[in-house]
Each structure stands twice: as structure tokens, then as C-alpha cells.
Amino acid sequence: MSYEVFRRKVNALIRKAGGGINVRFSTDPEKGKHYANCSDGTTIIGNESCVRVSVRWGSGHQSIAAI
């Protein structure tokens, strides 16, 4: 998914969760990855070629989700 679509979808998830979480977005065009670093310690990683994202939190926990 594109960087703009990634940002839009992550922001929609934050709103659905009740808000109150700040998100810092970045992208690495060479690797084709997008990053959303949340103020609660969660990191969401998206990819240009896939609609699924990797969600990382806590002390090494990780999950894959379709957004």
C-alpha cells in the first residue's frame, strides 16, 4: 500500500481505539517500508507491496494484521 494510504488507515485505527495516542510516521523508500511509531510504544510497519502490516509492542511481541 502507498505511504498515504498507510497513514490514513493507521490514523483511522487510532480514532477507533479512542484516540489519545500520538503517532510519528516515516518511510524508507529504498526498502519500501512505512513506519508508524506510536506514543504507547507500539510500532506498525507497512509494506509497499502488501496490505498486511506488522504490529510490534511490549518486550518483543509481534503480530501480523490486515488493515
Image: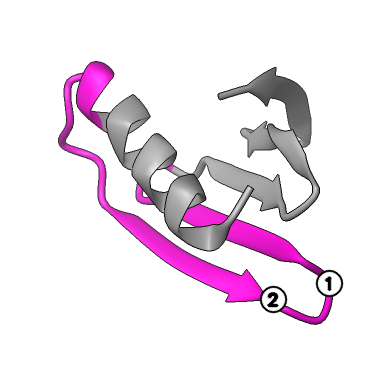
Q: Is disc 2 placed on a helix, strand or loop? A: strand
Which residue is depicted at the point 52% across and 71% down?
Answer: 26
Give the residues in magenta. 15-40
Q: Residue at x 69, y 33 (%)?
A: 51
Asked if residue 44 is positioned above or below residue 53 in the image, the reply reads below
Q: Outermost residue toward the bottom?
A: 30
The residue at which mark 2 appears reads as: 28
Where is residue 20 drawn, in percent x and y?
16, 36
Against 49, is 59 above or below?
Answer: above
Please determine whether, in this image, residue 18 is positioned above or below residue 7: above
Image quadrant containing the C terminus: top right
Front residue (pair 11, 43): 11
Q: Is residue 20 magenta?
A: yes
In front here: 15 or 39? 15
| CB within 8 Å, label 2 to label 1 | yes
Q: Does the rendering let one see residue 66?
A: yes
- Residue 59 shows in this picture: no
> What coloring was used for the rendering?
one colour
Relative to 10, is 53 on the left or the right? right
Gap in Å between the C-alphas at discs 2 and 1? 6 Å
Callout 1 crowding tier (Cα within 10 Å): few <14, some 14–19, many ≥20: few
Residue under the image location 75 percent in, 28 percent down: 61
Residue type, numbered disc 2: Asp
Q: Nearer the viewer, residue 31 or 48?
A: 48
Q: For mark 1, what is the residue? A: 31
For the point 76% across and 24% down, the residue is 64
Tag 1: residue type?
Lys
Helix, strand or loop under label 1: loop
Quadrant of the rendered structure where residue 24 is? bottom left
Task: Please give the label number shown on residue 39.
Answer: none
- Local packing at callout 2 (Cα closer than 10 Å; few below 14, some 14-19, many 20+) is few
